[in-house]
Amino acid sequence: MMRAFRKAQEYIDGIPKFVKKNTMEDTKAFYRRLSCPCQNKKVIHVAGTNGKGSVCAYLQSVLMEAGYSVGLFTSPHLVDIRERIRVDGEYISEKEFAEIFRQVQENCGAEDARRKPETENCSGEDERKPSGTENCGTQAEERQHAAGKNGDGLRTDYHPSYFEYLYFMAMLHFEKKQPDVIILETGLGGRLDATNSFETPCICIMTQIGLDHTEYLGETLSEIAGEKAGIVKKGIPFVYSANNKTVADVMEKTAKKAETRAFSIKPEEICLKKYDEKGIDFSYYSGYYKYSTFHLSTKALYQMENAALCVRAAAVLTEMGSVRISGEELRRGLAGMHWEGRMEEVLSEVYVDGAHNRDGMEAFLKSVRADGSEGHRMLLYSSLQEKACEEMIRLIADAGLFEEIVVTQIESYRAARAEDLSEFFGEVKKTVIKDAGRALQYCLQKKSEGIKIYITGSLYLAGQIKALIKQ
């Protein structure tokens, strides 16, 4: 069965080489061909720029603590592709992955599509464009392709993109496992994201919006927020982060147009109570749970806002009667959440964080600044070339938090060259080691008691480092 799983993974990894760009109409038509799996399930839909995965993980933990079975679809994965599809925290098995892969394949004429390679490819992550780009684009790209259609309205040459394929697999897996609640994380988009083919969620959640993937979503915060807010549905309650007025205005206008209730999370409603080696204590007023203090088992200060989004969503869902979550179940669920690659301590005083844009880097540096370190800090850094590397590096250099910075290179054709990244650091003390494994060894060899090592710049780097440590 392992051989079947490897073959399925190899096929999915190769999808961008031969698949055509798909419209939302295509995606919905294929979803109908699969008999609309999970159509009657309680689904939580989560979009945003930063914090989507963490909010999903907090919701999963809280719901499980309250006794619910939970299906979770997220992206990207750090080490194992099966991370993307989980039920009650457990990855889909290799056997089930292979079986459901075939189920999707049997419905999409895979071999016909493979014989018709296209120069304009769809993409997911992992050696590709970022997740969800296959359904992001101009109105012209939304128009139906000239290719013929089948009786069910699907293009005769249709084939799911990388991200779509895994999304459809997740929904088929959840249909089989029948969890009580399903949590769907979008790719990078919203309005045209493959997950938006599910039209009846019980709640929609928007995390922090930032300037990321501007080549797909728009050049301003307002444009990006508008694309992300495309997940909002008529009459479906909507919880969002209101830490930026421009974004908040877009969210309120979208909710009003959709005739739905919007619940905002404002920074002034969140109060840090305690921060130490054991984690974070913060208070938040949610209405339903009143003023409450919660503990998070993390050193990432930015997780307070993500946890607050979970608290408000839990309150809304409980008030609606969709679920029942007590205050104590909420506290235990938040305290027990662990999400990989977000200020994760992978070895003693070695932390991996997936900060990969300006907002994420500012949040990362805020947590580092508050770590109470009395010794030195080292940073291992790398990035993808299409990211705002120079801007992120300037933030790091200006912060003055690290005694030495080690610059390495991610294993990807999209990786920024280590030498180029090093130049952006200017006069800061730095060492260039292109091989990430050797760079990690260098940092660990120089580490002594009291020295903290931080690794950041990309979730791809986080995944690569975690795989190296596991080896």
Image (spheres, rainbow, N blue to C red):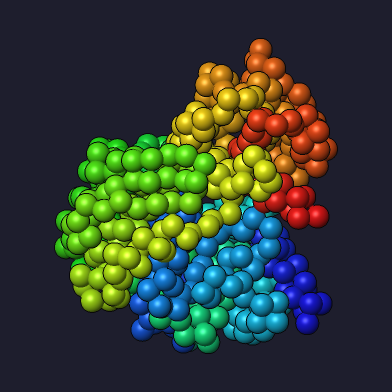
Quarter occupied by the N terminus? bottom right
- Residue 212 locus on image (x, y percent): 48, 41
- In depth, the one of 295 and 386 nearer the eye is 295
- Residue 263 locus on image (x, y percent): 22, 55
Direction from residue 332 to residue 425 in the image, left or right: right
Q: Residue at x 70, y 77 (%)?
A: 94
The quarter of the displayed image where residue 105 is located: bottom right
Q: Residue at x 48, y 51 (%)?
A: 297
Direction from residue 5 to residue 148 in the image, left or right: left
Inspect this view and state whether residue 394 appears.
no
Direction from residue 128 to residue 182 in the image, left or right: left
Quarter occupied by the C terminus? bottom right
13 up-or-down from 170: above or below: above
Direction from residue 353 to residue 140 in the image, left or right: left
- Residue 163 locus on image (x, y percent): 57, 63
401 up-or-down from 128: above or below: above
